[in-house]
Image (tube, grey):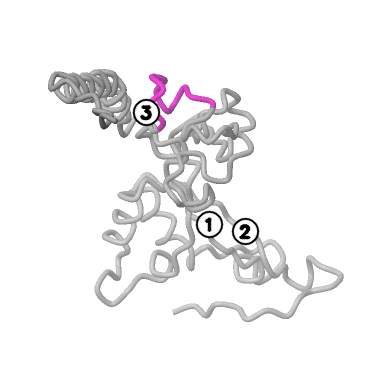
Amino acid sequence: MRPLRQRSVPRAIPAIVLAACLLVALLGALAGAPAADARKAAKARVSRFDVDGDGIRNGRDRDVDGDRKRNVVDPDVDGDGRPNDYDHDIDADGVQNAFDADSDASGDPLRASAATAQAPPGFVGLVSDDAFWGTDADPSRGRTMAAIAGTGARVLRQSFYWSLLEPQPGRYDFSLYDGYMAAAASANLSVLPILYDPPAFRSSRPATLTRPRKS
């Protein structure tokens, strides 16, 4: 009996298999290149003023950070990790909330997370004991008043004690306030007087307050 002879594998088959593997790898690389390019392009689109890279600038994007939450219900509109209440630029449009009419890019300024309106000139005011009494370094109050005006404030709120202004019925004494009013006027500051402590003859229930003493 003759022994069976195994058929020999043609030498060309391993080479064909290797070539096929190389071809598959090459096709895979070519197919992955567009995806990689797309990812790079998407990453390039993401910028400071387009957080989610959707091509819509933050100030006009109703979902700034792309988390599928509308800005009006998103506690962190721009996704920077700072809650809206502690973020000075909620929608990351480069405009501070205080100056941004639509601070959360909701499209509805009246319902914005930090709704703002342009304050009229002279809206901001303050109270200053140094401005009223003067200081050892600035007894005339001139420098103090100028410093206050330099902050943008235009109004000074000051208590006026009626019992000192009218110590007797029909007799008025404004000497305590004359210098203060003159210094405020020189600095182009208005005064909002708050009247306290009516004299007993002007009130049925006179209050007991600590009154400033004349110098």
Q: Is residue 175 above or below residue 61?
A: below
Quadrant of residue 13 within the rendered picture: top left
Question: Percent from the top left, x then y, of residue 80?
Answer: 42, 46
Q: Which residue is mark 1?
A: 157
User: Do labels 2 and 1 touch, CB within 8 Å?
Assistant: yes
**In the rendered view, does 122 fall on the left or right side of 113?**
left
In which quadrant of the rendered image does the N terminus lie?
A: top left
Question: Image point 26% across, 32% down: which residue?
Answer: 3
Q: Residues within 10 Å of mark 3 (few under 14, many from 20)?
A: many
C-alpha span from label 2 to label 1: 7 Å
Question: Percent from the top left, x then y, of residue 186?
Answer: 33, 48
Extreme-right residue of the structure: 204
C-alpha span from label 3 to label 1: 45 Å
| Badge number at residue 108 | none
Please tell me whether mark 2 sits on a helix, a strand or a loop.
Answer: strand
Earlier-in-chain disc, 2 versus 3: 3
Question: Percent from the top left, x then y, of residue 43?
Answer: 30, 30
Q: Report the front residue among 105 and 191.
A: 105
Is 60 included in the stretch rendered in magenta? yes
Question: Image point 13% across, 22% down: which residue?
Answer: 11
Extreme-front residue of the structure: 1
User: Do labels 2 and 3 touch, CB within 8 Å?
Assistant: no
Earlier-in-chain disc, 3 versus 1: 3
Q: Which residue is mark 3?
A: 50
Question: Percent from the top left, x then y, of residue 101?
Answer: 50, 29
Q: Report the front residue among 182 and 110.
A: 110
Please tell me whether mark 3 sits on a helix, a strand or a loop.
Answer: loop
Q: Amino acid at mark 3?
A: Asp
Q: Is residue 152 above or below residue 135?
A: above
State which region is magenta: 52-62
Q: Which residue is mark 2?
A: 194
